[in-house]
Image (tube, coloured by chain):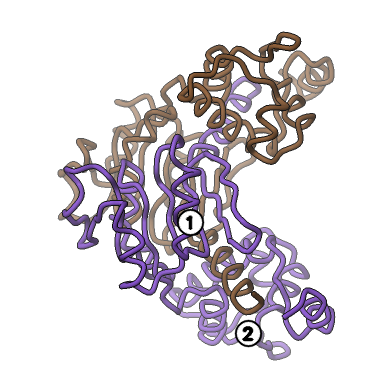
Chain colours: A purple, B brown
C-alpha cells in the first residue's frame, strides 16, 4: 500500500493509529476496572474511574472511544466486557513470541518474570555468548549461542527482540536482530539504538527511571 | 524554607529543578560517551554525540549545561570527567537503599537484577505475606513478613519503596509504606497510585510499554 493510501484511510477514520498518551493511559483504566471486579462491581462510568485515578472524566471517555465498546446511559460500561475489550485491544490476549538477547543481570531477571506472559509476551529463547550459560535454561527458557540466532529464527515464530546486552554491543546486536527478521525491539539498555523506519522500538530504561526518581527525591529532600 | 524562598532561589539559578525530558536524555549521553571510552576516545563534543544518537547538538549542549562541566573549544568535553560528572549528577554514584514490596514474579525478578546497584539502587530487604517466602532469601536479599515493615524501617536506612504487589493491594501497601517513612515509590504495577504531594512516584509499567509496542507492531504489520 502506498503512503498516500494509508493517509486516506487514516483520515477517513477506518484505521486509527492510537495516540501514545492514550495507549499509556488505557492500562491504568484496565487496572482500575480489574480492581472494581475484585470488589464485586458490575458496571462503571468514566466519571467513577476519574474519581479514583485522578484523570479527567472527559479524557477517559475520549480515550475509551478508541476502543470498540459502548457504555449504557446511567449504568456505564459492563466491567467484564470492558476488561475483555481492553485486554484484547492492548494486545494482552494474543501471545507475541520474543527472543531475549543478553542473559546478564537484567536479562536473567526478565527471564524469571513469568508475568510477562499474562500480558501477551512469551520469551521462547535467549541468546548469549557466555559458554557457562549457553546450553542451559532459565525458568525453562533455553539459552542458545548468539551465533545460532538466524537458525533459531526459522524454528520459532518470533517477531520481538528483548535487548538486554551491554551498551558496547547494543547497536551491532540490534542490527543483527533486524537483519534476521525481528520487527520490534524492546530496548532495556540506556543506549539509544538506531533502526530502520519500519522497525518498532520501545525503550524501557530502568536506569533512566532511577535517575528521574533520585533527582526528584533529592529535590524534595533539599526543599521540604 | 518558605515557598517564596524556593522560588527566589530557583529564579536566581542557584538551584534548578532539571526538566524531566533533560533527565530522560542525560542517560543516553552517558551511555554514548561510555561507549566512546570503550573505543579508546578521550574527548567528545556535543556535535559528535549528536551524530551518533540522533538528537540535535544544540539540545545536547543545553541539556549538558545543567551539569557542572565545561567543554574546551575545538577539543570538547574530557570523556572521563564527563562520565564522572554525569554519573554523580544522575545519582548513580551514591547508594540509595530500598525495600521491595511483593515478591511475585516481577518482584522476584527484580531481586535477581544486581545491575540496579551499579546505578545506585540497593534493595536491602523485601516484604511479602506468602509463608513459603517469608524467612527465605533471593539473591542474598532477606524476605520479611509485611507486618515487620515498620520495625525493619528502624533497622535499615531506607527511603525508597519498590512496588511490585498485585493491583488489588497496590494502594493500601503504598499508604502503609508512606506512613512508615518511605519517601519515593518506584511503582512497577499498572495501578495509578495516589500519594501526598511531597512523595516521589516513578511509574515503570512494563505492561503499558508492552501495550505500546504491540500496538505499533500491529500497525506496522497491517501497513507495511
Q: Residue at x 43, y 27 (%)?
A: B120
Q: Are marks 1 and 2 in contact (CB under 8 Å)?
A: no
Vertical side of B43 occupied by A45: above or below:
below
Whole-percent x, y for residue A33 in the image: 54, 73
Residue ID for mark 1: B206
Whole-percent x, y for residue A36 in the image: 51, 74
Few, some or many C-alpha atoms within 10 Å of disc 2 (few <14, some 14-19, many ≥20)?
A: many
Q: Quadrant of the C terminus of chain B?
A: bottom right
Residue farthest to the bottom, as pictured:
A72
Vertical side of A158 occupied by A109: above or below:
above
Is residue B148 or residue A140 the one in the foreground? A140
Q: Secondary structure at mark 2?
A: strand
Is residue A202 or residue B154 the one in the foreground? A202
Q: Quadrant of the N terminus of chain B?
A: top right
Vertical side of A141 occupied by B27: above or below:
above
Are the numbered discs 1 and 2 placed on the same chain, yes or no? no
Few, some or many C-alpha atoms within 10 Å of disc 1 (few <14, some 14-19, many ≥20)?
A: some
Whole-percent x, y for residue A3 in the image: 78, 74
Q: Secondary structure at mark 1?
A: helix
Q: Chain of mark 2?
A: A
Is residue A165 or residue B181 the one in the foreground? A165
Q: Residue at x 73, y 22 (%)?
A: B16
- B56 on left or right of B219: right
- A159 on left or right of B220: left
Residue ID for mark 2: A77
Q: Chain of mark 1?
A: B
Q: CA distance from mark 1 to mark 2?
A: 26 Å
Residue B122, by quadrant, is top left
Q: Residue at x 49, y 21 (%)?
A: B37
Amino acid at each position: 500500500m502506498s503512503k498516500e493510501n494509508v493517509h486516506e484511510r487514516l483520515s477517513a477514520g477506518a484505521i486509527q493509529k492510537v495516540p501514545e498518551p492514550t495507549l499509556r493511559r488505557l492500562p491504568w483504566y484496565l487496572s482500575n476496572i480489574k480492581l472494581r471486579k475484585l470488589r464485586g462491581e458490575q458496571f462503571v462510568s468514566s466519571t467513577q474511574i476519574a474519581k479514583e485515578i485522578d484523570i479527567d472524566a472527559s479524557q477517559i471517555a475520549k480515550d475509551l472511544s478508541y476502543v470498540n465498546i459502548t457504555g449504557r446511559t446511567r449504568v456505564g460500561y459492563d466491567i467484564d466486557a470492558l476488561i475483555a475489550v481492553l485486554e484484547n485491544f492492548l494486545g494482552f490476549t494474543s501471545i507475541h513470541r520474543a527472543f531475549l538477547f543478553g542473559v546478564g543481570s537484567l536479562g536473567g531477571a526478565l527471564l524469571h518474570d513469568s508475568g510477562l506472559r499474562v500480558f501477551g509476551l512469551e520469551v521462547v529463547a535467549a541468546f548469549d555468548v557466555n559458554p557457562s550459560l549457553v546450553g542451559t535454561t532459565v525458568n525453562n527458557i533455553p539459552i542458545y549461542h548468539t551465533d545460532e540466532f538466524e537458525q533459531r529464527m526459522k524454528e520459532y515464530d518470533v517477531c520481538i527482540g528483548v535487548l538486554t546486552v551491554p551498551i558496547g554491543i547494543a547497536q551491532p546486536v540490534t542490527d543483527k536482530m533486524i537483519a534476521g527478521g525481528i520487527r520490534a525491539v524492546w530496548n532495556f539498555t540506556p543506549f539509544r539504538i538506531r533502526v530502520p523506519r519500519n522497525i518498532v522500538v520501545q525503550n524501557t530504561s530502568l536506569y533512566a527511571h532511577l535517575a528521574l526518581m533520585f533527582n526528584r527525591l533529592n529535590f524534595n529532600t533539599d526543599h521540604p
